[in-house]
Amino acid sequence: MRILEDFKEVFRKSNNALAQLIMINIAVFVVLNLLKVILHLSGSAPMFTKLQEFVMMSPDPSELLFKPWTLFSYGIVHMGILHILFNMIVLYWFGQIIMSYLGSQKLLNLYIYGVVAGGLMYLIGFNLVPYFQQQALGQAPLLLGASAGVLAVVVGAAVLLPEYTIHLMFLGPIKLKYIAAVYVFISIIQVIGDNSGGELAHLGGATLGYAYIRQLQHGRDLGRPLAWLFEKIKDLFSRPKIRVTHKNASYSFGTENVSGTRSRSEEKSANRIINQEEIDAILDKISEKGYDALSKEEKQMLFNASKK
């Protein structure tokens, strides 16, 4: 199926977090809404309610204890088409800015941490603030939507580049700091409205976005544990390893298929005299951006060096 192949292609590419996040949200939206129609038409509506409770977040701490994944899974769940459309458009706009200046991993860090921070703010608000506790006395509202993660990206971009200007339809050029300020202000004044849980999550995501970029500007990357986790997961599915020593440390990376007929450029690369400075530069690039960021020639040079 071509659609499935296109979906796989998005995830084969490295440094492609923005497209991957959008595709995941869209895929979950399509699957959940199709299941909703099917289960309702078949008279199994209560089953769909159970499914919602399985992936959306409850303000009840005991629910989170038995379903800890909902602290993240709620952030990729949308049921309304306008809800997902607006979130994905904003994520695309501001995610491109973060990707351009900080890279794919930092965008992923902002989004995931923003979702988690939003969920925690929602949980704290509905358990410690009297106004929200009164709201939860009846049917506790379940939390869903990517807005907390999206707002973390929006505020993060504004903190990183406050004077950066984008052109909005009907409004003209506006600086990022003003766009982020409007978003946060709207969430503050609507926090006592019908969507108070969602607005609490927005504020949690915004706070995280601000803190993450400010810490990054001071040389502290709060996303390192998350990046490490993703690297470990990636290693589980990586190709066979070879090792090269660099500056008294060794690094692992996937091997390339160099058997069979080589192209002229590959022969030229193989026959070059490779010095240690070139290898050090390549390994520094792996350390900063990952093995997949190397060019074909750099991979070949590294493979040739490993055989010496």
Image: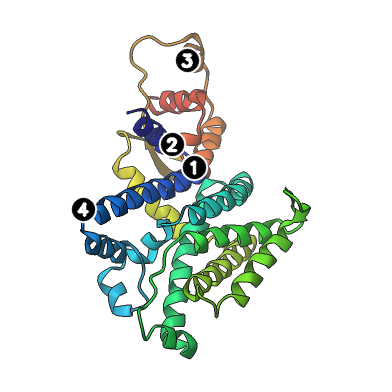
Report the residue marked by disc 3. 266
Residue hosting label 4? 42
Left or right position of 206 against 131: right
* Residue where numbered disc 2 is placed: 10
Q: Which residue is mark 1?
A: 19
Q: Look at discs 4 and 3 and give the one toward the viewer.
A: 4
For disc 4, the neighbor class at 10 Å (few under 14, some 14 to 19, many from 20) is few
Residue 265 x/y as whole percent: 51, 13
- For marks 4 and 1, give the one nearer the viewer: 4
Amino acid of disc 2: Val
Residues at marks 1 and 2 touching, judged by CB atoms closer than 8 Å: yes
Q: Quadrant of the C terminus?
A: top left
Cα gap from disc 1 to disc 2, whole angstroms: 7 Å
- N-term-proximal mark, 4 vs 2: 2
- Closer mark to the observer between disc 1 and disc 3: 1
- Secondary structure under the numbered disc 3 in the rendered image: helix
The residue shown at (21%, 53%) is 42
The Cα atoms of the two marked residues, 1 and 3, are separated by 32 Å
